[in-house]
Image (cartoon, helix red, strand yellow):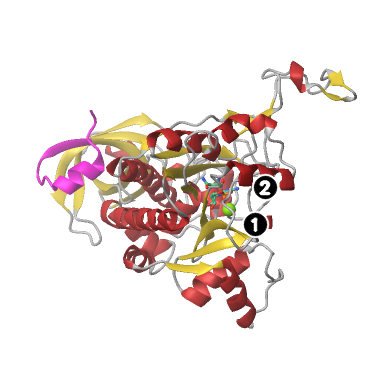
Amino acid sequence: MRTRIKEIIEQGAVSAPCSFSGWVRSVRASKGVCFIVLNDGSTVDGIQVVAESTLPGFSSVCRIATGAALTVSGTLVASPAAGQQWELSADTVEIIGAADEQFPLQKKRHSFEFLRSIAHLRPRTNTFGAVFRLRSRIAQAIHRFFSEHNFLYVHTPIITASDCEGAGELFRVSTLDAAHPPLLQGHPDFSQDFFAQKAGLTVSGQLEGELFALAFGDIYTFGPTFRAENSNTPRHAAEFWMIEPEMAFASLADDADLAEMFIKYLCTFALAECAADMEFFDRHIENGLIERIGRVAEADFVRMDYGEAIERLQRSGASFAYPVEWGLDLQTEHERYITEQIVGGPTFVLNYPKDIKAFYMRQNDDGRTVAAMDLLVPKVGEIIGGSQREERLDRLEQRMAEMGIAGEPLWWYLDSRRWGSCPHAGFGLGFERLVMYLSGMENIRDVIPFPRTPRHCDF
Ligand code: 4AD
Ligand code: MG
């Protein structure tokens, strides 16, 4: 296998012959020397290649364009230049794939907005290199965390007939002829569709995850989820990834404890295992990021009832665009105020009014709240949503009836409350929101390789 720049730099094998393949970030020729910064995606800095005028084909090497793919062989030597430890003194420079001045990434700095319009090329920039390396490592760390805690990894379906969150945000999956569907009483007849019923892309793997928790104890899902909500915000995508653990014989308090341990583990992991990229974010994206993440890794997350959160927002004297009143949902501005101004760190808000939450949440004895929790963090707002589930069949059926949710299509879910039901709890962590939180990136479109948002699905 090819040697990666990161591996060689970490070994620091001085004066050893070596060879790298990568893409040119910049070329600078001056008085008989040519400096090429080559990046192979393994580190943010890449390596500086030094070509002397004695190199065969020196004049064409000086004309190599930014963006070209090269293989360079030579000797790794200590660099006299500031800001880098090693450089490669080249013996041969082979052009594998040429580029020209039309290559869009010529400047050092481009706006994120412009880079979104060239999502097929932006992985070749320093910022997106760092983002997608972090994203990859964090995905692996998530599996590692659950593996260390003996959670079963379950693949829940992507095509489903049930809208878990009940918000009606399902993308339809259908093979009916859209222009001329078979009709039944004037409406499309889905009994003639591929699945013989209405189907869509999943908004959450939770309901199926619960069934597995009631067999394996502790499980998690980690997969793509889809929401056809028309919200054009920096925190919403139509396609995003969610991590959903579910624990049998567990309460809301256990759920919050798991979430806290999980987030701290991932903060510690990012600082220890993605240090170079985290330093890059700290320098170029958010000053103080490393300190912020370090504090979270050590912090005790605050737990606050929804009722108290409402009171403290009302008492704050701050003015908000949306009203603050018991019974209304918290908007992002409120969530951020709680975690940024009132608490100054990650905060669980617990026990929300039942009327603003999903049917499956466990009803509290007060008759008006459910055992729900959201974890709010500075800058992002809600990063986790979860709850203890209603395990009592009669209470669940009664709540579904109140909310107008038909029991028949969810017969399999209700069955789980018929035989061997037990208290259980889980949560969903939005993977992109986590990557935003860890990197300081402020738009969800910039932490997902090819973002899907309203009116955007090109590549
Ligand atoms: O709060 P949500 O809707 O909860 C659920 O779906 C539950 N079934 C989870 C569970 O208990 N197993 O979504 C969970 C998280 C949110 O806190 C947020 O981080 C993320 O998913 N999320 C989104 N991320 C990006 N774009 C969107 N449109 C998102 N909607 C939710
Ligand atoms: Mg939520």
Q: In this view, does 85 lie above or below 70?
A: below
Q: Which amino acid does label 2 sit on?
A: Arg
Q: In this view, does 57 lie above or below 110?
A: above
Q: Which residue lies furthest to the left in this view?
A: 15
Circles 2 and 1: CB distance less than 8 Å?
yes
Does residue 65 belong to the magenta stretch? no
Q: In this view, does 140 lie to the left or right of 345?
A: left
> Which type of secondary structure does the marked residue at label 1 adopt?
helix
Crowding around mark 1 (Cα neighbors within 10 Å: few <14, some 14 to 19, many 20+) is many
Percent across and percent down for residue 348 are 48, 63
What range is drawn magenta here? 1-19
Q: Distance between the residues labelled 2 and 1?
A: 10 Å
Does residue 12 belong to the magenta stretch? yes
Residue located beneath label 2 in the image: 399
Residue located beneath label 1 in the image: 354
Which residue shows up at 52% across the image and 76% down it? 341
Percent across and percent down for residue 185 are 90, 23
Q: Which of marks 2 and 1 is nearer the N terminus?
A: 1
Percent across and percent down for residue 419 are 50, 33
**Which of the two residues, 150 or 199, is positioned nearer the viewer here?**
150
Q: Can residue 53 be seen in this view?
A: no
